[in-house]
Amino acid sequence: MSGTHIHRQAQPFFLKGDSRVALLFIHGFTASPSELYPVAELLHQLCACSISGLLLPGHGSRPEDLNLCRWQDWFAAVKTALLNLQEEYAEVFVVGLSMGGLLALYSGLHVPGVCGVSSINAPVFQRSTLTTALAPLIKIFRPYWPKQEQGRQRQLEAEGRFAYDCFPLHAFQSMMELRNQVVRELGDLKVPVLIMQSQNDEVVKSESGRYLAAQLRHREARLVELENSEHVATMGPEKKKIAHELAEFITR
């Protein structure tokens, strides 16, 4: 995928801080760092941390590029980004939205030295069970599945978010493999975890957050329920609350 054109709204970002603390922000499936920038900007104003917004492989260009990627490709990019941050900063945290939340949790399990993990609306239980269950079959004759809620998608696009308008099903199935891997290994997670879950999430069932908290009940884990947020909570009415929760999490 070398030479692939990246959309101008999908570019990675980096906010330089004055402290020895850095965070890696990981976006969701089919999306881009743009959906995390509003919270990153607020957090950057609250504390002197540096924040890197990563663009995952296969994202920010064409859905066809994403269907060539698997979850191991996304994690490899995350791991490289974390290791690069660890070379420059004393404390490195990882924050992920949706699929990015799964990658954040997996990083906490498999990247030594991560100081803490925050997962926002990780897709443990999805509302679209039909697509989830049938993706392995559907992808054979229909590699792309149109998204619902197109009105909401267009609104987020108008606010600066870049995302594909469909689900590439080969990649979607790989995301579900990542989900299963995270669920299997969750009990081994040793680092502090901040779980945030929207109660009006149109993509992920709200019990996902409570499930994660229950699995991590013997660890240093906290669940924050976002009462007025939808799936892309980082661009919603509680983005300031998310930023404040993250600021408290990394400075406790």
Image (cartoon, rainbow, N blue to C red):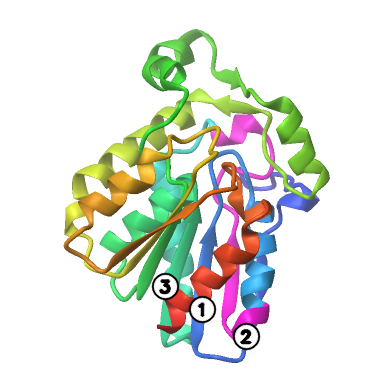
Closer to us: 55 or 26: 26
Query: Measured from the top left, where is residue 21 in percent x and y?
Result: 49, 84
Relative vertical location of residue 221 with respect to residue 69 in this rendering, above or below: below
Kindly identify the amino acid type of the residue bearing the numbered disc 1: Ala
Closer to us: 144 or 180: 180
Q: Earlier in the sequence, mark 2 or mark 1?
A: 2
How many neighbours does mark 3 have within 10 angstroms: few (below 14), some (14-19), or many (20 or more)?
some
Q: Is 44 on the left or on the right of 212, as rendered?
A: right
Distance of mark 1 from mark 3, alpha carbons? 12 Å
What secondary structure is marked by label 2?
loop
- Give the residue displayed 76% in from the left and 47% down from the top: 7
Instruction: For the residues labelled 1 and 3, say whether their Cβ atoms are less than 8 Å apart.
Output: no
Tag shown at residue 67: none
Kindly identify the amino acid type of the residue bearing the numbered disc 2: Gly
Q: How many marks?
A: 3
Instruction: For the residues labelled 2 and 1, say whether their Cβ atoms are less than 8 Å apart.
Output: yes
Quadrant assignment for the C terminus: bottom left
Query: Measured from the top left, where is residue 29 in percent x and y?
Result: 54, 40
Distance of mark 2 from mark 1, alpha carbons? 8 Å
**Mark 1 highlights which residue?**
22
Kindly identify the amino acid type of the residue bearing the numbered disc 3: Leu
Query: Measured from the top left, where is residue 219 in percent x and y?
Result: 21, 65
Q: Is 59 on the left or on the right of 171, as rendered?
A: right
Q: Is 155 on the left or on the right of 89, as rendered?
A: right
Whether the magenta-drawn stretch holds residue 54 is answered as yes
- The residues colored magenta run 45-66
Tag shown at residue 17: 2
**Mark 3 highlights which residue?**
83
- Give the residue displayed 37% in from the left and 34% down from the top: 125
- Give the residue displayed 57% in from the left and 42% down from the top: 231
